[in-house]
Image: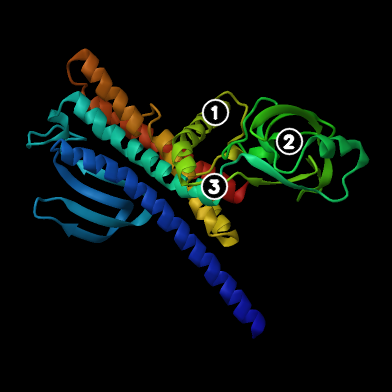
Amino acid sequence: MLYQLSSFASVMSTIGNIVLAIILFAILIFIHELGHYTAGKIFKFKINEFSIGFGKALYTKKRKNGEIFSIRLIPLGGYCAFEGEEQDSEVEGAFNNQAWWKRWIVLFAGVLFNFISAIIVSIPLLMCWGDATPIVNGFADGTPNHIEQNLETLQKGDIIRRVDGTKPTLLGGGLNYLVSQQGDSTYTLVVERDGEEIEIDVTNYVIGQNEQGEPSYGLGIMVENVKYNFFESLGRSVPFCFEMAWDCLKVLGNLLIGNLHISNLGGPITTIGMIADGASISPIFLLVMFPVIAVNLAVFNFLPFPALDGGRSVFVILEGIRRKPINQKVEQAIHTAGLMLLFGFVILVDFLQIFIF
């Protein structure tokens, strides 16, 4: 009976974490679509529907101005439907009749809102959790003699700013990723000590085994993230988010040139699973994941790919350069094909993560 109660509690906890992950994902989508909606209202675009999710409508409410707000069955997306966005319309405020630069701002607003939300949430994140910049707070027991040099050169309180010229970042994997090469690798660390930056050469060594039974490596030190006060966090929040955006672009670039395997990617289902797993360890993981996913959504949505905000923006800018509209049937056909490719790719990477990798 005790075992059954324990198992039931474990299942309910897992379900609760999945629900929290879905809510977090839905909030980020809502913020993105709210950006489109807000900019559209500012420029007096006619909006037909604001939806969170896809599929069958679970809840709808029609406002006096004709706008429909809906919550749909599948909470892995959403949309802000403008009159005249997919086909020509002569209705006042139709998307297709607006100046190209107004349409570009409306398209960009979703990305902007995601990025702003990431900056806002990064402030308490940097205060409570810190960024990926590690500070030495102790030394591991049983350190082998051949790396005693590390213990002599590194000191408790040292802030590690660079590893072989690379700054540890949140999406870059932090310090552990940078020093996880084969044994006896030598690294040049730039550490901040008493307000001054100094260079220190260190060597990593075998500290244990990973889940596959392979040796894992480390520096023989224990670290924690550097935390900041409110005003420091406020000043660091913007570059912190730009660092994450740059890391996102580097991941995409490495994927395109073949330096990164597709197993490193995941779709919405994989993302929700990762958030749920993290939430089961610590609620603060939700605070970590919010700006990470928000920045990822911002970067991904503004890629110049058909059906994404970035792809639509390209057509709008081309119209501004040509000074005449793009054939809307041709444009919609391109966006439809792009949307099908995106859905296919997202389903593929989620399938591979769940059943293959």
Task: Report the Cα–Cα distance between label 2 and label 1.
Answer: 19 Å
Observer-side mark, 2 or 1, equals 2
**Residue at position x 57%, y 76% in the image:** 8
Element on which disc 2 rests: loop
Q: Is residue 31 left or right of residue 214?
A: left
Give the mark nearest the N terminus, 2 or 1: 2
Query: From the image, which quarter does the N terminus lie in?
Result: bottom right
Q: Is residue 142 left or right of residue 76?
A: right
Q: Quadrant of residue 42?
A: top left
**Residue at position x 43%, y 35% in the image:** 300
Task: Report the Cα–Cα distance between label 3 and label 2.
Answer: 31 Å
**Residue at position x 56%, y 70% in the image:** 11
Give the mark nearest the N terminus, 3 or 2: 2
For the residue marked with disc 3, what is the amino acid? Answer: Phe
**Residue that numbered label 2 is attached to:** 179
Query: From the image, which quarter does the C terminus lie in?
Result: top right
Q: Is residue 271 visible?
A: no
Crowding around mark 3 (Cα neighbors within 10 Å: few <14, some 14 to 19, many 20+) is some
Q: Residue 189 in the image: x percent, y percent?
A: 72, 30
**Residue that numbered label 1 is attached to:** 250
For the residue marked with disc 2, what is the amino acid? Answer: Val
Element on which disc 1 rests: helix
